[in-house]
Image (spheres, rainbow, N blue to C red):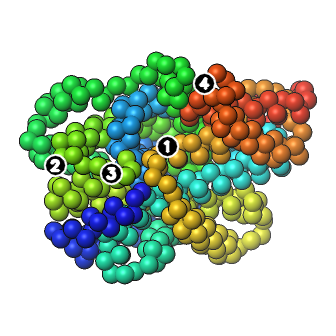
Amino acid sequence: MSCNLFVILADNFNDMSPSVILGIFLIYMALLFVVTWVTARRADSQSFYIGNRISPWFVVAYGMIGASLSGVTFMSVPGWVKETQFSYMVVVFGYLFGYFVIALVLLPLYYRLKLTSIYTYLEQRFGFWSYKTGAGFFIISRTLGVSLRMFLVINVLQIFVFDAWNIPFWINVLIFILLIVAYTLKGGIRTIVWTDTLQTTFMLLAVILSIIHIGKGMDLSFPEMAEKIRDRSISGMFITDWHHERFFIKQFLSGMFITIVMTGLDQEMMQKNLSCRNLKSAQKNMFTFSGILILVNFLFLCLGAVLLLYSQSRNIVTASTDDIFPVVAFQYLGPAAGIVFLIGLVSAAFPSADGALTSLTTSVSIDFLGLDRKQGIPEVVRTRIRYLVHLAIALVFFVSILLFRTLSDTAVIDKLLTLAGYTYGPLLGLYSFGLFTRRRVLDRVTPVIAVLSPVICYFLSRYSEVLFSGYSFGFELLLVNGFIMFVGLLLFSRRSSGVIGDR
């Protein structure tokens, strides 16, 4: 994001003072802490990890919308329309099929094995090193991804609030993370299921109200805005040139497998599903969630289209597509639109951050410290260890966000999905091999293959146009990564008469 641009805007932004912005933010946080106080009372380790498996499926489904979208979607997808039109919807259609795979293949497996961490499946199926490899890649992927998401939100707060008071960026980051730690430390998933519901509501209201504000700014009704979007040909979805990185078949398949790995093989998203009462409830949650998500993503793209129309009508030029939404909201539409934008942005950011912190705490505590297996440890000691892990992960977030401040001006959602292709590919290969073959791998070789696979993909992507007659890799790099991992496991495997955990 262009910091210089936001500095210029902040200098000219007199209608809404930093004190007002901060006050709105504090009121919002107060609401979250009320929910936290209600849900975290009498919480124990099982409450933190899986919500005692009593979460209502419809609440989980609705709250997962906010966790899936995040602040990156709130800012990056609307701006991305300028470069890619509505082609992202093809990826979203792929998401739908990916969710069906999760509901019908992965969730039954997880519930049958009564998993708390989904990566314990890899230990039962392959062995110790495969298990640690899967959990390790999740930790790396989720840490980088959520740090990138949080950076986007924190940077906006820095420009419009903290810079006005000469407060350094690192203090802003520290405050943001400490707030998340405070309302997730005790209740974990039990709390997050309900706070995400609150935040999803605010986020969706912000998108709808933003579209209304922009329409008023152009003196257009909803039907008139829809007509202009069609007339300007900014709603095109399907790119038919197979060389193009956004060729529609590549987009669809990429979306499908991105969903499988970033939801079905992701501890954060599956932890919420596993908090439901039973498999049937979890599947109802997944089917409902996937349908709502299609509509919500389309709503974001419509927001992007009207933002583009508005910026073109006012000759607004920004250094990055991520800047379009905040520039229009703050500089052109007045304080009410600015307030709506900030509430929506924060509401989109927190569900992603709190869920990631909780899931990473769960993975480290169970997958690497084995707190669920060690007998004789008093609950108070287990809780103390979990608290320390929670704080340590928060510290890693803090450092990562500071490093991400050197980001370039390309769309952050583009970076996020590209990053997923490298870090989730080995997980895709591991789970595919485990589910669709009955072979045993040479367990100690798994970490080596998992590291080599994304390295090979990096060089294939960098030189793809030379190697493949002008072909350019897009998000389907995830499939290539998973395939390389699968082939590597196949080469170092042997026949097996039975498959543990897959009967």
Gap in Å between the C-alphas at discs 3 and 2? 20 Å
Which quadrant holds the N terminus?
bottom left
- Residue closest to the eye, 473 or 178: 473
Gap in Å between the C-alphas at discs 3 and 4? 30 Å
Which label was assigned to residue 414? 1
Which label was assigned to residue 453? none
Instruction: Determine whether 432 is above or below 327 in the image.
Output: above
Task: Tell me if residue 91 can be seen.
Answer: yes
Q: Residue at x 90, y 39 (%)?
A: 442
Mark positioned earlier in the residue sequence (3 or 4): 3
Amino acid at the residue labelled 2: His
Tags 3 and 2 touching, CB below 8 Å: no
Q: Residue at x 27, y 55 (%)?
A: 327
Query: Residue at label 4?
Result: 470
Residue 114 screen position, x and y as percent: 66, 45
Q: Residue at x 59, y 31 (%)?
A: 473
Mark positioned earlier in the residue sequence (3 or 1): 3
Gap in Å between the C-alphas at discs 1 and 4? 21 Å
Query: Residue at label 2?
Result: 213
Instruction: Please state which of the two labelled residues, at mark 3 or mark 2, is closer to the viewer.
Output: 3
Query: Residue at label 3?
Result: 318
Instruction: Please state which of the two labelled residues, at mark 3 or mark 1, is closer to the viewer.
Output: 3
Mark positioned earlier in the residue sequence (2 or 4): 2
Gap in Å between the C-alphas at discs 3 and 1? 17 Å
Instruction: Please state which of the two labelled residues, at mark 1 or mark 4, is closer to the viewer.
Output: 4
